[in-house]
Amino acid sequence: MMRLLIKQRVFSWTDTYDVYDEDENIKYFVKSELFSFGHKIHVYDTYENEVGMIREKLISFLPVFEMEIGGKILGKIEKKFSLFKPRYEVECNGWSIEGDLMEWNYDVYDGDRVVVQITKEWLSWGDTYVLDISDPEDELLGLLLVIAIDAANCDRNG
């Protein structure tokens, strides 16, 4: 099990996040484009190389985001209609995502097995998420998922 801490920068013109490993070392930097139709969010490593990107698809009833790693589109994350608990489907690997009633905590499933847990911290300056990932190979995809979920919630909340 590994952990990432994702902290939103409060005083920024765009959605900007610093991502730390469990030893509080910066691991990634996330920044959205200021002037774009829909969200375009880039993920950079500590050497400022782009390692991932999220691009919102504009023609859809509920939020849909394409996920790209290393210049290749892996698939998409799509918010699904549900009455009480938010639910997302990840097209690239059969994962599904269920949130709690308040839309702060999410579990990512591969079948019946939880592969990523997303927890939003209370009483923090800016949005702060803790990501617990069962397989280190899923680290970047887990990061893209939480950023896409935050962007979808941002769209809904204005």
Image (spheres, rainbow, N blue to C red):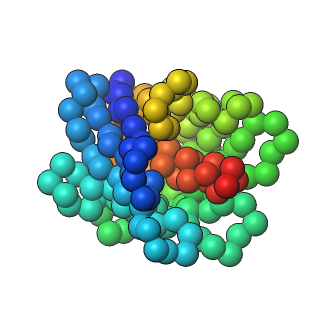
Query: x, y (%) of residue 113?
Result: 55, 30
| Res. 2 image quadrant | top left
Residue found at the very far left of the displayed protein = 47
* Residue 43 location, quadrant: bottom left
Q: Is residue 145 left or right of residue 106?
A: left
Residue 31 percent location from the top left of the image = 37, 57
Residue 65 rendering spot, x and y as whole percentages: 55, 62
Left or right of 120 in this view: 70: left
For the residue pair 141 and 104, the one nearer the viewer reads as 104
Using the rendered view, name the quadrant where residue 53 is placed.
bottom left
Instruction: Name the residue rendered at 40%, 48% in the picture.
Output: 11
User: Quarter holding the N terminus?
Assistant: top left
Residue furthest to the front? 11
**Quadrant assignment for the C terminus:** bottom right
The residue lying at 61 percent from left, 51 percent from top is 154
Residue plotted at (62% across, 41% down): 97
Seen in the picture, residue 154 relative to 122 is either above or below; the reply is: below
34 displayed left or right of 26: right
Q: How many marks?
A: 0
Q: Nearer the viewer, residue 129 or 16?
A: 16
Query: Quick check: 20 above or below 80?
Result: above
Please state if 109 lies on the left or on the right of 53 as rendered.
Answer: right
Q: Residue at x 68, y 75 (%)?
A: 59
| Residue 126 seen from this side | yes
Q: Is residue 79 visible?
A: no
From the viewer's side, name the closer residue of 47 and 73: 47
Classify 123 as above or below 62.
Answer: above
Residue extending farthest to the right is 83
Question: Would you place residue 19 above or below residue 156 in this image?
Answer: above
